[in-house]
Amino acid sequence: MRFITKRIGCSFIIGALLLSNTSCNDYLDINKSPLTATEIDPSLVFGYAVTAWDANKNSGDGWLPVGLMAQNLASGGNFGWGRENVYDISVYSLGNTWKTYYSTGGNNLMQAIKIAESADPVQNNAAAQSKIVLAQFIYEATALYGDVPFSEAWNPEEFPYPKYDNQKDVLYGIVRLLDEAIAQIEEDNVLKIKDYDIYYNGEMSQWKKLANSIKFKVFMLMVDAEPTVAEQIGQLLSADNMISSTADSWIHKYYERENNENPKFRLLKDFNSGVNNWFFANTNVLNYMHINDPRIPLYFDAGEAANGEFIAVGTNLDASEETATISAKLYRADAPSVILSYHELLLLQAEAYARGLGVTQDLTKADELYKEGVKQACIFYGASVSDATSFVSEDLESLVSTTNPLNEIHIQQWIDFMDRPQDAFIQWRRSGPEGQEVPILSLPSGAPAGPLIRRWTLSPDETAANPNIPNPQPRYSDKMWFDL
Amino acid sequence: MDKKLLPLLFMITCLIGGAFAQTRQIRGKVTSAVDGNPLLGVSVAIFGTSQVTQTDGTGNYAVQVSGNDPILVFSYMGYAGQRVHVSNQSVVNVQLAADSETLDEVVVTAMGIERQSKSLGYSASILNADELTKARETNLINALAGKAPGVRISSQSGTVGGSSKIVIRGVNSLDGSTPLWVIDGTPVTDGTSAGGTTARNIDFGNRIGDISSDDIASLTVLKGAAATALYGSRAKDGAIIVTTKKGTGGGSPSVTVSSSMRFDNPLLLPDFQNDYAQGNFDSGIGEYVYNMRYLNGWGPKITGQTVKDFLGRDVQLHAYPNNVKDYFNTGYSNINNVSIAGGTESSDYRLGLTHTGEKGIIPNSELKRYNLSLNAGNQFSEKLSSRFSGTYARIDAAGRPAQSSNNPNILLSSVYSIPRVVDINDLKNNFEDPLTGEQIFLGSLKDGNNPYWIMNYNTNDNVVDRFYGSYNLTYKPVDWITISNNLGGDITLEKRSSVVRKGTASVVNGAFYNTELFSRQINNDLIVTVSQDNLVDDFKFSLMLGNNINDRQSESTLITATNLTIDQLWNYPNAANTVPSRAYSKRRIVGVFGDLGMSYKDYLFLNVTGRNDWSSTLPLHSRSYFYPSASGSFIFSDAFEEELPAWLSYGKLRASWAQVGSDMDAYQLDYQYTPVSQVFLQFHGNSNIFPFGPIETAFTGPRILPNYDLVPQRQNSFEIGAELSFLQNRIGVDFNYYNSATKDQLIPIDVAISTGYFSKYVNVGLVRNKGIEVAFNLVPVKTINFNWGIDFNFSKNTQIVEELTDELPEYSAASGWSGLQIKAEKGKSFGLYGKAFQRDAETGKYIVDADNGLRLTEDNKRLGNLYPDWMLGINTNFNYKSFTVSGLVDIRHGGSFYSGTVEGLRTSGMAKETGGDRSQPIIDDALVDKGNGLVQNDVPVESHQLFWSENYKAANTEANIFDASYIKLRELRVSYALPNRLLSGQKVFKSAEIGVEGRNLWLIKSEVPHVDPESNFFGAGSVGEAVEFYNVPSARSFGVNVRLTF
């Protein structure tokens, strides 16, 4: 037994020494995660960025509070969603949306660009696709927040506290980024984001049209504050290489498949048994729609007690059983998210001709584009071609004969954006100088006294960590550069 | 039998069963001088060695000694210690006198080193077996509440088997403080569910709750860095050293049986109004109108009017004041423990089995826990000994409710929103259509789930299988050298499942979620101890050198399955969509450490320690880091025994200084792209979306920018203290002052999001905690038959964030819902932040909107401190012969608390304060500016509904913040131990004791309406606390305990 004891003792000591003398560095070199990659294809981060972005835009952050703020959506007061998000933008929405543009969305696009441009061979098309989407991110960010970081953004080592570029520079920067992307596009090169290109399946000619269309939209935003861009507007109109059909429209599709549904549908499904009795027709939209507008029964469902009549309600007033709700059709699972549509572009072009921006003022041409734009909008939202044609030909006044053709165009642009609050909010602000916007909005019931909201304030996450934020920080009611 | 098991069994048999008696055995019995009863769990140490044992349930002990005149040191909580020179005796019986001091107690300190209490240069609190089982708690942590100064306990909820949080001497880091738990020398995990604003906030308990208090011999709380310097980073927030019960050699086996039975009910339920039905204020007609759309209390006054109810019946409205109260069950729990302890002259064993069965106050919630533990030691020879200690624990819990917000299955939200006019029995009997099997909804919109549907079908369960244990082998080549190796492991596999039945509001097609969590920790300590008492006259030296290897691995897999074909078939192919996700982490530390101890004449002690760690998680250039400590104590009552007055019984001064270094989480250094299945959606949280259309897989770059230029975090601390006792230990004071500063914290600090990242790992910040701890013991009455003792445990901690970065004045540590944040701000302690009401600086009155009379608000304001100003625990014990009555009152003063439940109750018009006369408009006592400066408000709010729902909504953070102070009667127990004379003459029982116990009995004082101010919806491991959203109410318990020794 003594022998056994000694053997156990010796084995224990030898074992312990072996354990303690294992090469320390080898033993500790385990700090590589087996669940992550350090090198990937740009399409993988591109796919994430665009999905995260659109999810935000159609969620309780980028859609709901903007819709109640822009007043193309009605909360129904105590009868519906309630007052919680009316003229009260939560710090989370401010922060989550900012994070989408700069981090979860924006930085992943920047990574896609870096990976594509440092690949061998260089993947120019992938870089261009990413840049075009990134340009839209920044367009939306500046339209919502005003002056934003751009020239020093996404470069933490060199610029840990990115400066805030003024909006004019940001918008010009977007145009430069788009020009860079257009120059980078190689239509015949098979190296590109194809399968994960959920918009155009890698068809680079459509990406080029999209880039030009975004440029056009940006110039139309700038033109009141910077009239010289009319020239570029004219050039884009004459070049005629923008979105030219509904098939070219920039659409983010959703699906009926579980987890792939439109976030608006998911909100109702997950929290209200899939039924919309939270969001209602806003008088600021319905009251501007022609009674024969075929979009009315497509946009709205009549209230249960309204006998088929479509009755709207003010932004934050109490709805009732008679009030029309936003339609189940618009909040269906596979309702697409429209980012830039053909019909929207037609209406913008109509505006350019009506105002003579970079082209000779031409109301006839404008009317043609205007009616086609409204018709295509009606068809897009589900009206039959005949109904749409009949509506524009019989019920829409001709721009040539109307007293205020621009007002008519702005009304149709506003109506078109009923389900796209971010675009509606931009459209309203650029539709006229303060107090003369289309439509004329007033402070919603229950909103804090003061002027109308004209922007979002900066994200608290950003203001807490970036000493280069504007001083003083902008307030909700402050106008931004493009907003006269 | 599997052939592979045979060698293993043989080895175990050899290790624990062999007997090689080479030393002399001393046996004896320890009894109480108070009543003559045997004392269980008395520590019996051999002075000058690391050997220690404990008495069993009959007060018997046996130890192996060597040498001519060994000294035995007997110590026991609440009794004066004794030293006995054994000489040539073989039986040493001892009677211990009751005392409020524990002067010579043996304390298990870092690395399992046993030291005399008086030699410690730092504060340590010791709780013995009796303290822990006096009034049994399912979660061991709760048994510490109020019993150790500087230790703050808060239980998260009344969920059966719910988790509890422990903080020692304040929160040190911007990412929280979590003490290290060590069982028989092996660090073990105290993992917990995340809590907070996670999509499914379910309290699955914390892993220390797996431990049975019946298996514990003693528990030592090491509070300061000096106490824990040898454990390094993992113990920077303190360490809790658990020693499990051992067997006793040399006697006949003894069997101990103890049984507790307990009944629970909610400690506190909300006060509801009982005047109004559900409905809505119709501004058109200016009346409150009944409407089945709503689950609230904003309808008409209940006057017996006839309406349709949720079952479509014409009913007369009347209130059911107890409908919520009647929803809850009387909980029931049963804790049974049986253990057998015995051994030979050279070996000992103890085998224990504990069964805990618990039915919660929420119907259908239950927990079963089994603990099988073995502690066996063997002295192979004079030089070689071993000890194995291990526990297998299994927890099987069902019906844990979802808490928090933004989830239609939150049970308490559904229960508290039952309109006052609904009979709970109607609801209970009508939650499911008997023909179609569909849910019967309470509201006509079918947007809120019937609580009985949630409770019966949408359940959250978990099962834990865990083994933790250690094997220690000790070799003494010569008397003064000890080589010891302790190999330990802690392996846990937990399976969590949540199911949502088809037909559930918002999850119409059903779903289930399965999570598997695996964690493994392997720890090895090789320690060489050299002791020399004879080198220099009056001096004793000991030197310990050691090597530590620690390997921690964790892994989790979550599978979300949605859109089920067949109802309640929880199988993946039955789901149209399944989304898996996985997490993995592995990290290692290699350390070498040393401890040099010196003592002079047994009244002056000095210890110097040093440790160097190499961590796998730090950058190569900084993975090695060293940290030292020094501590000393001076027993001046021994040094100046002759000069000091007789009324001073004992006096000790102590001081210590220490530094502790620490590392960071694994895999934070590389720029990594992570495959993801989710994106963020407001109200849903992170939500499954990939594969999305043609996008089969998606990756994202990091949110946290990696940083390779990191150095280890450092914590410097010092403490000074004194222990004094007077009048033959009738009065005792233990005072401690400490000051610790944790700097270079390794945390992801917020960066400008416009850089592309949420945060960046940096060394940043300095958080200082300083405070005092006072333990005051008093024995006002002490007679032969009657003793009264009272202990006060007071602690006051002040936390200050002294440094962040220059650019960052505040750091967001955790978030609640709707803008509530917990932040660290330079120059302040952690606090609650959010939207505050605008107030007039001069009068302090609210300022309201001139248009509607509602209060105006302002963003991002500090709304209160997170932590208490001070804590006080008052323990008292009355002993009369064999009767003992003990009680514990727990007092917290200061700090703030946010209640989402109160918010919900008020905005929905259910809270009592929203009732009363609603016919008159409310004009807030506030100021208003109508264009000519502030004047007294005269603007009425349109309705009571608007007043409460707008002013008290979640986004108005301040409206739902309260003073978190409370006074609680935490524990009360009456017990009777059968005296020896009654047990004589029979051979079945060696001892018997019966007690009546109660826990969490009475919330004597609280500033928070409707809910327990201790609730916390953050996970126990989170920095977040003092916030609750529909937590399960904490339980009040009454029970009976019987302990028999055979």
Image (cartoon, rainbow, N blue to C red):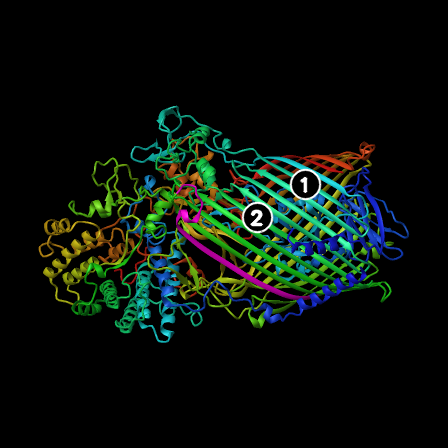
Of the residues shown, which amino acid type is indicated by label 1?
A: Asn
Asked if B1008 appears above or below B389 in the picture, the reply is above
Residue A112 pos. (x, y %): 37, 68
Seen from the viewer's position, the closer of residues B5 and A120 is B5
Tell whether A7 sits left or right of A241. Answer: right
Residue A8 placement: quadrant: bottom right
Residue B165 pos. (x, y %): 58, 49
Under circle 1, the secondary element is strand
**Can residue B802 be seen?**
yes
Under circle 2, the secondary element is strand
Q: How crowded is mark 1: few (under 14 residues within 10 Å), some or many (20 or more)?
A: many
Tell whether B691 sits left or right of B489. Answer: left
Q: Residue B337 carries which label?
A: 1
Residue B584 is covered by the magenta coloring: yes
Name the residue: 29% across, 35% down.
B284
Q: Residue furthest left?
A: A401
Tell whether A284 sits left or right of B432. Answer: left
Segment colored magenta? B566-593
Residue B921 pos. (x, y %): 38, 34
Residue B26 is covered by the magenta coloring: no
Seen from the viewer's position, the closer of residues A287 and B492 is B492
Residue B889 placement: quadrant: top right
Q: On the image, numbered disc 2 is attached to which residue? A: B464
